[in-house]
Amino acid sequence: MKKALFTLACLTALIAVSGCGNAEKSSAATPTPWVITATPTPTNTPTSTPTPTDTPTPTPIVDIFDGEAYFAPSTSLEKKLAQYYNNFFEKGLLSTGNTYRLREKLEKAKNGEETIVCYLGGSVTEGEGSSERTPQGYKKGYAYMSYEYIRDNYGNGDNIKYVNAAISGTGSDLGVVRADEDVLSYNPDIIFIEFAVNNDTSIFNKMTYEGLVRKCLKAENEPAVILLFSDATYAGATQVYMKTIGTNYELPMVSVRTGLETPKAREFILWSDFSADSVHPKTDGHKLYAKLIAYMIKKCMEDTSYTEYVFNEEASVKAWATYETTTMIDHNDAKGAVVETGCFTAERTNFSSTGNSDNHALLNGWTRKANSGSDGMKADLTCRNFVIVTKCVRSSKETSLDVYVDGELKKTIQTTKSDAWNQPVTTLIINSDDVKHHEIVIKPTAGSEGTAQTILALAYTK
């Protein structure tokens, strides 16, 4: 019994000693192995603030102009286009077409040879809306501004000449009539044609437009022909068929309207930033227009893949080739067609335009003074088509001319309107698929003898 008590005492003492040993260890600074006092940040652990995934990296703006200072945005309109500035040029350049003729003509200019640059169109081509002036005192619009670019970048001295053959308010129906005298007589090297805001979508306008393009392309000097499409609040439909015609002949084409579509739609610019009315660009608008033409020239000169230009004899629409043969008749060159002048007198004629081009056209017509009789002018002509260009004057009293073909009253032409401005008006009289001989008589309508009328020109096709 004593032995057992002794053994129990010894065990109790041993346990007490062991407990004292743990108490000594816990009082020391050494932590218990399984207690984590700190967790170091691994070097490969992501930061607690990640980069937002919805912040796009800005796309660098590509310099489509190769650093050429001329194209740097300088006007308030150009700066307002902002991110759509390049877009205007890329969209507005519809086509560089076959670049051969234009490159050849500009190389000729660079070599110091005389080079004639001609512009044919309406009031936008005359420069209406611009506040700047050319050295000749005319309004300085896109035509003269783009000529300056050609002169300064491809000229050699004063070898590049400028001809502005525009007439306000006129379309291709008159343009094709006077093309030989007012454009091709200069033997031009480059011809810009702009009738997108004056033409309509009639078959007559479509035919005369294609006829004009063909006439210019087939000129002896083989000029480069460039089609321009201006903008207006009412424009758009004509560009559709004009672009089709230009594509048929592989022509360079630019459109201010197409270039401005996106920034206008997104209201980066308003129409009033470009124009003060429904059609004519302001000075800034003309400058932007000229830069678009310059960009087209730049891109054409870069494209050396064309080694010749072959004229496409097939018209975009077969019948539309007719008006390429349009020939004008005036008292200076009646071509044997006018056999009697009747109550009309051959004298210097004129009409009112904006007076902003250096073109002097339709000067050799016929006038009829008030109360001078009613004997008609007679023409003896073999033709397919026949047109008359008259002057329309402002008057509250309506007067007119009657046109008889082979003894039958074919058309009555109004020669006065309350909103007229003495402008030239082209009227189609004969439109036939066949070439026939006709006797034509032009006389004042009964009741119109007491007023004056003016015939500016006649024209026909074969």
Image (cartoon, rainbow, N blue to C red):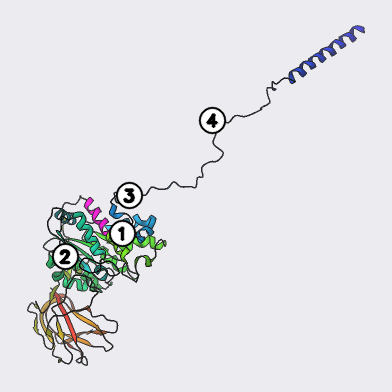
Describe the element under mark 1 as helix, strand or loop. helix
N-term-proximal mark, 4 vs 1: 4
Circles 1, 2 touching at the beta carbon (< 8 Å): no
Element under label 2? helix
Any magenta on residue 298? yes
Could you tell me the amino acid type at mark 3? Asp
Closer to the N terminus: mark 4 or mark 3?
A: 4
Residue 173 position, x and y percent, is 21, 73
Work out how far the residue at label 2 is from the one at label 4, CA to CA, in angstroms: 76 Å
Disc 3 designates what residue? Answer: 63
In the image, residue 258 sits, relative to residue 454, either above or below, namely: above
Please identify, in this view, whether the residue under mark 2 or under mark 3 is nearer the observer. 3
- From this viewpoint, which residue is outermost toward the top? 3
Q: Are marks 2 and 4 in contact (CB under 8 Å)?
A: no
Q: Which of 68/316 is in front?
A: 68
Residue indicated by mark 4: 43
Indicate the position of residue 220 as horizontal and vertical percent values. 11, 63
- Residue at the spot of label 2: 216
Work out how far the residue at label 4 is from the one at label 1, CA to CA, in angstroms. Answer: 55 Å
Pair 4/1: label in front: 4
Tell me residue 390's x, y (percent). Answer: 19, 81
* C-alpha span from label 3 to label 1: 16 Å
Please say if the residues under marks 4 and 3 sit with CB atoms less than 8 Å apart.
no
- To which quarter of the image does residue 379 belong? bottom left
What kind of residue is marked 4? Answer: Thr
Q: Is residue 58 visible?
A: yes
Q: Amino acid at mark 1?
A: Gly
Q: Earlier in the sequence, mark 2 or mark 4?
A: 4
Circle 2 packing at 10 Å, graded few (<14), some (14-19), many (20+), is many
Range covered by the magenta-colored residues: 291-303
